[in-house]
Image: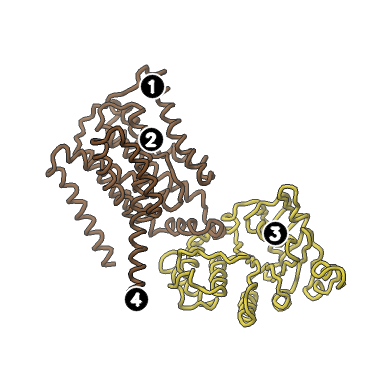
Chain colours: A yellow, B brown
Amino acid sequence: MTTLLKIQNLKKQFGGLTAVNDVSFSVAEGETVALLGPNGSGKTTVINMISGAFAPTSGRIVLAGENIAGLAPNRIAHKGIARTFQLVRILPSLSVAENVMAALAFRPNHLWGTEARDRAEHLLLEVGLGGRGHEHANDLTYIDQKRMELARALAAEPRLLLLDEWLSGLNPTELGVGIDLITSLGQRGMTILLVEHIMEAVRALCSRAVVMNVGTKIADGPTADVLADPAVIVAYLGDGHA
Amino acid sequence: MTRTILGFALVALGLAALAWLPTQVGAYGVGLLLGMTGYVVLASAWALFSGPTRYVSLATVAFFGIGAYTVAVLSETLPYWAVLLVAAGIGLAVALVVGLATLRLAGVYFVIFTFGLAELIRQLVTWYEVNVTGTLGRYIFLPISPEQIYWQLLALAALTIGIGWLIARSRLGLALKVIGDDETVAAHTGIDISGVKLALFAVSATIITLVGAIQAPRWTYVEPSIVFNPTISFLTLIMALLGGANRLWGPALGAIPLFLLFEWLSANFPSHYSIILGLMFIAIVFVVPRGVLAGVEDLWKRLRRKGEAA
């Protein structure tokens, strides 16, 4: 498998605090990889650096052979990385369809007018919001807002999709639907890097997992092995459980 | 589609009527129409940038003055149409430089910078005139009648509102809505936020420069304290806010009554005029922060909901 994303010695300091320290890992084309770790371990900071929200203090982020570390988020989006946010971010004054069209209209091979409208409708159907494009984004329920956010990310036709706790806050039925949705994306060859706390989802979705703790990488390998690793259990649950 | 055509027909009819008006109203009337149309353009152009981005600019008079001064300096060496082109070019160039330097400033810093910019340009022009040319004022002798100035401003008003209409239907318009809702999402969906803001600032500033250039022949005599008068920036701002800076017709609707009111106030209460201006400023920000049009829309929605509930 060819490597799509290669993170090399990534480091981020906020003043005196080192949030991410010398982290390296890679994601192969078509792979679904989990980025795990307890709260505050630096997972979202890594996602934020990959998507360009923060510039790394040092290190390289190589996407298909090109170092994209420190580029502005709009340039990184144009390189083929799309993301969802830990706390769902909708565009409240726009309709559901317009939320998706926003991504269609500003991707490199942009769509506009009827083409964009049709494509948005198709993407909404894919995430389970078929026929609801005219509704106000603000009126959607939480799960539907998450679906819409996913449709917006997919609209960019990304080479790499970053999902930051996309499954959190869903009830058990919704969780099943969400896992199926991401599984189907993976089956279509989408490369996905996801931050997740729900282990059931990680086991179902990810062939590989990378685990972080206090800013450093402590494990990297097949999901089942990583989750059985004593160091990982200690990081999550404390010394008494190892 | 038919509604759009109907709308265009109405606007064209309105424009024709407005263009015909000077033949009916006499010299004083033409003067009023001219001033009013000038402010309709200023407020509409100001709102093109400041409405969607919510960056409050007090640089209006900087560009207005640049336009007027360009005409004062060049009107005897270049044909009139070329002077207008040069003025627009200078306004555009200054806007691009200023925009690149300042659009990263947020909120109140941008307001202060733009206010400072207008003062800086006024002082620079004053210094240059006193030290280099040796005079302060300049005369403009151009054979352009008030009616002709009015028609030019009317055309510019139509152009400005037309640009606003086009932007609202374009990708740029969608980019503005997305930026207005959430800049983080905007950046991550591939929108070049600084580029969008810079483009709008440049368009708005170029139009404002042209207003100054077109109105210049009206004064005959110009000096920095006249064409760089900060009151012009404040008036433009409260006119746009009164009507609603996020509505196509909002700034125009705010400009007309306020211009007439200020004309009357400055004629009848010349010494208390600025106090009243300040009070009105405060009142508008407190009572209709999103503009009268948005206020009316909210009221209408509430009434309809009540009607449905009953």
Marks 2 and 3 in Cβ contact (< 8 Å): no
Amino acid found under the numbered disc labelled 2: Pro
**What secondary structure is found at the residue carrying circle 2?**
loop
Labelled disc at residue B129? 1
Q: Image check: B187 left or right of B286?
A: right
Letter of the chain that mark 3 sits on in the rendering:
A
4 or 2: tag closer to the N-terminus: 2
Q: Quadrant of residue B210?
A: top left
Amino acid type, label 4: Glu
Task: Measure the C-alpha gap from mark 1 to mark 2.
Answer: 20 Å
Camera-nearest label, 1 or 2: 2
Left or right, residue A3 beside residue A233: left
Marks 2 and 3 belong to one chain: no
- The picture places residue B162, in percent across and down from the top left corner, at 31, 53
Relative to B123, A213 lies left or right: right
Mark identifier at residue A46: 3
The front one of B76 and B153 is B153
Q: Which residue is mark 2?
A: B230
**Secondary structure type for disc 4:** helix
